[in-house]
Amino acid sequence: MVDVLVCIKRVPDVGGQVLLTADEQAVDGRYVGFTVSNHENSAVELAIRIAEATGGTVTLLTVGPAEAAEQLRATLALGAHAAIHVEADPAALGPADIAREIATVVTEKEAAGADYDLILLGNDAADTGDFQVGIRVAYALDRPVVGGVSAVEVADGSLTATGAGTDGEVSYAVPLPAVATVLEGGAEPRYPTLKGRMAAKKVEIETRQLAGAPSGAQRVRLTLPPPAPSTVEVLGEGPEAAGAVVDLFERLGVAR
Amino acid sequence: MPDVPASAKCVVIGAGIVGNSLVHHLARLGWTEIVQIDQGPLPNPGGSTGHASNFIFPVDHSREITDLTLDSVRQYRELGVFTESGGFEIARTPERMEELRRRMSSARAWGIEASLVEPAFVQELVPFIETDQFIGAFWTPSVGVVDSLRAGTIMREGAVAQGALTTVPNVEVLGLDVEELPGGERRIRRVRTDRGDIEADYVVIACGVWSPKIGDMAGVSIPLTPAVHQMISVGPIPQLAGSAGEISVPIIRDMDTFCYERQHGADMEVGSYAHRAILHEPEEIPRLDQAKLSPTELPFTDDDFDLQLEQALELMPEALGADGAEMRYAINGLLSLTCDGSPILGESHVKGLWTAAAVWIKEGPGVGRAVAEWMTHGQSEIDVSASDIARFHPHQMRREHTRLRTGESFIKTYGIVHPAEQYESDRDQRLSPMHEAQRKAGAVFFEAVGWERPQWYGSNADLLEEYGDRVLPREHEWDSRWWSPIVNAEHLRMREAAGVIDLTAFAIFDITGPGALASVQRTCVAQCDVAVGKVIYTPVLDHKGGFRSDLTVMRLADQHFRVVTGGAHGMADKKWFADLLVDGAELTDLTDRISTIGLWGPQARAILGELSSDDLSDDGFGFLTCREIQVGDITVLASRISYVGDLGWELYVSFDDAAALWDRLLATGEPYGARPVGIGVYATTGRIEKGYRAFGYELDGERTIVEAGMQRPKVKAADFVGKAAYLEQRETEPAAVLCTLQVEDHTSAAGIRRYMLGGEPILTRAGEPLTDGHGHHPYVTSAGSAPSLGRHLLLAYLPPDRARVGTELAVSYMEELYPVTVICADATAPFDPENARIR
Amino acid sequence: MILVWVETEAGGLSEISLETLAFARSLAEAGGGIAIRAVLFGEVEDHEAASRELGAHGVGEVRQVVGEAFTSYAAAAWAAALQELRASTGSVVVTAAGSQRGNEVLAHLAARLDVPMAANVVSFDGLAPFVVTRQVVGGAAFEEMRLDRRPALFTVAGHSWTAVEVSDPAPATWVEERPEVAPADLLARVVATRTKAADGADDLKTAKVVVGAGRGAGGPDGFGAVAELAELLGGTVGVSRVVTSLGWRPHHEQVGQTGSRIAPDLYIPCGISGAIQHWAGCASSKTILAINTDPEAPMMTKATYAVIGDMHEVVPAIVDELRARR
C-alpha cells in the first residue's frame, strides 16, 4: 500500500498569445482559464496508477490562491482521495518558499500519522518554469530525488523510475521514501468522469495558512516577446508541387 | 494577405450562419458586388456558430420563431446537412406535463407532428434512459441536427461561384463611417478595416456577440448581451460506439433540469441553461489568438455545472457513467441574448446600415432569407416585425437594461413561461404623471415598453361582490395567473357608468410642414385629406399589402397631422413614417410630452360636461372629430374615438397637467359611478367584445385587410404604400377569414372550468385539423372575457368555408377539446353590433 | 570567478554548453575580465582536443571531476562536487546549460547552498543589482529576475546565445579533481541506460509521420491516397473530429482536443482547416506540411510548409513522385 502525495499548481491554460496582468507580475488567465500543467497531470496519473495497484491513496497538495481549489477539485475528479490547500498569493512566493511550505505540510502530516512514501511533482511549472521546487522539497525532507522521469513504479520499498537521458532512456532505483519530478509523456493523463467529478465534490479540502514568512520570487516583472509572423513556406500549388514535397521529405529524412 | 475590395454594393460583417445565409440569399435575389468580411478564419471564424450544439426542436410558442425555424430546416435539408434524429422534451413534474400539453397546442397550431408519450416509449428509442426519472415526454419526430458550418460554407461558396460575392477572412473592422445628409438623415458610407476601406451602399452587421461593438462604431445600439451556455462532451460511450454517423439516438431535452443530452458520434454532449446567468461584454471577448479554444469558447467553470452533471448522470447512469466515458471537452460557450428574447433584425436609424444578430442556429437560414428579402423588397415573406431593431425604445438600448433582463430571462430558456408573465428587473423606467395616484389605488402594474401601466386596480375589488359571477371567475391557477376578476368588474362598471383609463404609453408624433399631407397620404390606407379636426383610423401596409400597423391620425391643421399608435410598436411605426416622409415634411416625437387619458362609458359626456363648458353634444362634438377644450385651467386636446365600444374621448394633455386632469375626472366621475379602469379592459375585454383587431395579434405582415374583414367600400384615389397589392386582394377570395368564436362549454374532463389564453389550435368538433388557403392551421390570435356577454371569446383566422356564423368547431386547450361556435365572420361587433353606445 | 559546468555528449562538448560559455564570457567581460573556469564530469576521450576547444571558448582552466561516483549520472553527487569546486575556487557565479540535467544539477546546488537559482536565462540586464531575463511560460514570455545572493546560480536557455570562439585562443589548463561523495548523494543515480526501441508505426502518439485528413476526404472511401502516403512514409493516418463523427473512420484515429495529441516529426494535414479543437492535438508536431485549397485556412498559416490545392489531386501526385524516386 503506497500513499502518494502529488503537488499541483494552478497555472493559466495558455494556448495562443500570452497576456500579462496590468502589474506585469503574472500571466493573465481570464480568457484562457486555469489548469494544472501537463507534467503534473502525468504525475497525477502515475500516482493514481500506483495507488490503484497497491491499494494506496493519492493526496493532492497545492500552495496557491483560494481559486486553486478549482484545480484541486478537478484533479480529485480523476481519482485522488484527499486534498490539502495552503492558501497563499502565488506572486509573493518564490520556489524556495513553496518547497518549504510543502515540506512543512509533509512533516506535520507525517507526525500526525500520514506516510507519504512517494512525493511526486511536475518537473517544472508551466508558468514560472523554476525547475527546482521538487528538488528543494527533497532536501528539506532529506529524501532522495529523481528528476525528469516519465514513468515510476513502486515495489518492495523501492522506487524504479525511468526517463529520457542524454544517451537514451535512463532508469533509477531509489529507496522509499523518495521524491520524483515528472515529465509528461510516460503516462497519458486520464480525463475526469462524471462519477469522479461528483465524488470529488464530496471530498473536504483541508485548508492551511502559510507556515513561514515568504522570501519572495525575486521577480522584477514579466515581459512578452514581439509576435512572430506567419513563417509558412508555400511549396507550390496543385499536383505540380509534388516534386518539392518529396524534396522536403528527403531533407527531413522521412522518405524511405 | 489580400486587401479588401475598395467598394461594394453591400458589405456583410460576419461569416457565421447568419452572414453566410444572408450573402446566399442576397445573391439569389440578384445582388452583386457583395463583400463579406470576418475577423476570424474560414470556415469557422470563432463565433457562436462554431461551437453550437446544432440541434433543432421546431415547436416554439412564437409563430414568428416557428416559421423562421421551419424555413431554416427546409433550407438545411436542401443543403444536405440535416440529420433527423427525433427529439424528446421530458417532464419530471406535473407542472411540466401541463406545459408539454400547452406545447402540443403550439404544435397543432403550427401543424408540426408531435405527441405526448410515456417514459417507456422514450426508453425504446433511448435505451439507456432511466424511466423512473420522468413522468412523460413530448415527442417530435422531425427534430434533428444540422451542420451549420458546412451549411454556411456551401451557401457562401455558392454566392462566390455565382460571381456575386467576395469573402475576405481575417479582417478586422476598425470603424463605420456615417455621412450626415442635408435634412439630418444619416447614411452609411464605408467600412474601415485593417486591410483597407470599403465604400458601400449597404452594410449588414451579422457578427453575433460582437455586433454591439460594431454597431457602436456608427452610433447604433444593438442591445444584446453575450451570455454563457455551458456544454460538456462525455465519451466515448459504449452504447453509442456502434452507431453510424453523427447521431442516431433522439435528443433529450430534460426540461425541468434545463439540460439537454445530444449524441455526437460516440460522445454525448450535455448542455445546460440551468446555471446562474454568466454575462459578458462584447469588448471583453478575447481575440482569436488570445483564446484557448476560440473567442466564444471560454474556460469552463466546473462549479456552475455540478448540479446538472448529477442530474444528467441520474437520467442516464449507464451511458454517462460508463467505464471510459470521460469529460474531454467542456466550455462556457457564448451566445447572444436580448431583452425580449427576439432577434435584432432590420435597418437601423442609420440608412443603409442593417443588422441581423441574436439569432440561433435553428433560425439562421430563415433569418438570412427574411433579411435579404427585406433589403430587396422592403418586407419579407415571413413577418419578422417582432424582431425589428426599430422596436427598441431608448431605455431598451442601454446595455444595463439588456444585462438585467437577460440575467432574469436566462433561466427561462427551458422555463415554463406564462404568456402574460412580467419581468421583475429594471422596472419603473417610464412612469406616467398619475403613477403615484395609481399606486395608492392599489394598481397592479404591467409593463409596456418601459411604461408601468395599471392592469387593474386593487381599489376596485369592492366591485367583485357587486357583480358576483358576472366577472367570470377562473378557478384554475394557470388560467388566472397574471389575471384578476377585477378586470371584468372594471369592464362592467365602465359599461354601466364610466371608466378612466391611463393611456400614457401611446406613442405620439406629429407630421408637419408643406409635405405633411403627402407624407401621411402615401403612408396610410385611409383618406387623410380630410377637414381639419377629423380623426382617421387607418391600417398601414407594407409594399406587399401586409399590415405594418394600424393607428389613428388627427388632422390638427392644414399642414399638421398627429399620429397616435400603440407603445409596443411605436418606435417601428415612427421609423416607417420617417422613412416615407416627402420633402418638406418633418416628424416630431411627442411621446414623452403628451399623456393620454381615456374616458368612456354612458356617463362620460356628463362627467366631462361638468368639467368643461365646451359643447360636448353629439352635434357639437361628433364621433371621429377632435378639438381643443378647456377643462378648467387645463387645455386638453379631446378626440372622440373609442377602442372599447363606449361613448367617450381620448384626452391628450401635457405631462404637467395630466395628474390634475386624472384626479378631476375621477373626483367628478365618482358620483356617476366612474372608476379608474386598467389596461386589462382596454386591451382585452373592451376590444374583444367589439371585435376590434390588435396589431401583433390579429394583424401582422402576413395578414391582409380583406382577411381581417376590415375593407371599406372604397379605396382612396391617392397612392399609398401597398395600394396595388391591396387592390388585388380586394379582387380575390381571401385565403383565411378572421372570425370571432364563443366557447360553448368550459368544463374540462376534471370538472374544472378552463379559459383559453390565446395561441390554441382551432379544430373541427371531432378534433380534426383545419387548413386555410395559405396552408396554415387556425389558432387563437386573441382570447378574453366578454363580461357584458357573459362569454369567453376567441379570435381566429378560419378557412373561408368555415367562416360562417354558426359553424361549430372546437378549441384544443391543454390537450382537451372544448366546443366553440363562430359568432361573427367579419369585423361585426359581438357586443352592440350597431355601435349605438358610441354615439 | 565564473564556474561553468560544461556537459559532454558522445565524447564531445555539448553545443548548448558552448553557448553557455559565450554567455559566461559576455558576463565576465561586463564584470571587468573575470576568469572563467569549466567543470567536466566523467571521462573525456581526448583531453587535448577538449582543452583546446574549451580554451577557444574562453575557458582558462578546466576541472575534470573523475572517480567511480561520476561514471553515471547522479544529480546530487554532481551538485556536491560543484559545491566543493565553487568553494575552493571562490566563484561568485555558477552556471550551466539550460538542459534537463543542467537545470536539475543547479537546482540541487541551489538547495544545498540555500540560494536562488534562475532557470533558462537568455540575457543579463545589469550587474548591480544583478538582473537576468529568463524564459517562462514555455518560452512564450520572459521574466526579469534579481539574483542578489552569491553565488549567483543560473542556467542558460538553449539557442539564446551563439557559441563564438575567442580571437586569441590558448588551451585551457587541465586539472583533475576527485571529490569525496557522501553515500546519500548517490541514492538517486542512473542504474541503467538503454537506447530507445523503434516506435510502432500504427500508434498515432508515437508515429514519426502522421498524415491527417478531414472532411475534405469526401466520404469513407476518400482515404485511400492518404493511407498510401502514410504507408510509404512509414507513418499512420490521423483524422479530424468531423470524420469520426460522420463514422468515416474509427475514433482512435482522431487527432485533437477530444482525440489523441500527437507530436510527430512531420504532420501532413490534408484538407483540414485547422479548427482550434484540432490544432490543440497537433500543435506539438515538429514540422507541419499543410495541403488545402484555402490558403487562408488557419492550418495553412500556422504550418511550416504549405501546398495550395485539392488533396484529391495533390496527395496522389506526391505518392506517384515518391514511387518514381525509388
Image (tube, helix red, strand yellow):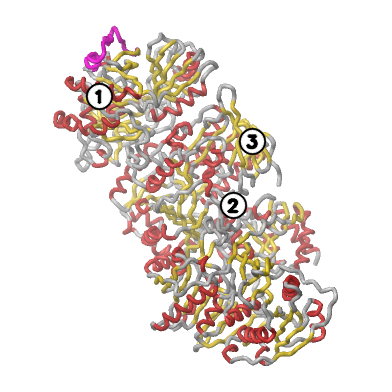
Instruction: Tell me whether circle 1 and circle 3 mark residues in contact (CB < 8 Å).
Output: no
**Vertical comparison of B540 with B609: above or below:** below
What subunit carries mark 2?
B
Q: Which residue is mark 2?
A: B288
Residue B666 on image: x %, y %: 23, 23
Q: Earlier in the sequence, mark 3 or mark 2?
A: 3
Tell me how far mark 3 sits from mark 2, CA to CA.
25 Å
Q: Does B618 lie within the magenta span? A: yes
Residue B834 on image: x %, y %: 27, 15
Q: Is residue B836 left or right of residue C170?
A: left
Q: Is residue B106 left or right of residue C243?
A: left
Q: Which amino acid type is marked by label 2? A: Leu
- Mark 3: few/some/many CA within 10 Å (<14, 14-19, 20+): many
Q: Which residue is mark 1?
A: B663
Q: A125 or C307, which lies in front?
A: A125
Q: A176 or B611, which lies in front?
A: B611
Q: Which residue is mark 3?
A: B34
Q: Main secondary structure of the magenta part?
A: loop
Q: Which residues are magenta?
A: B604-625
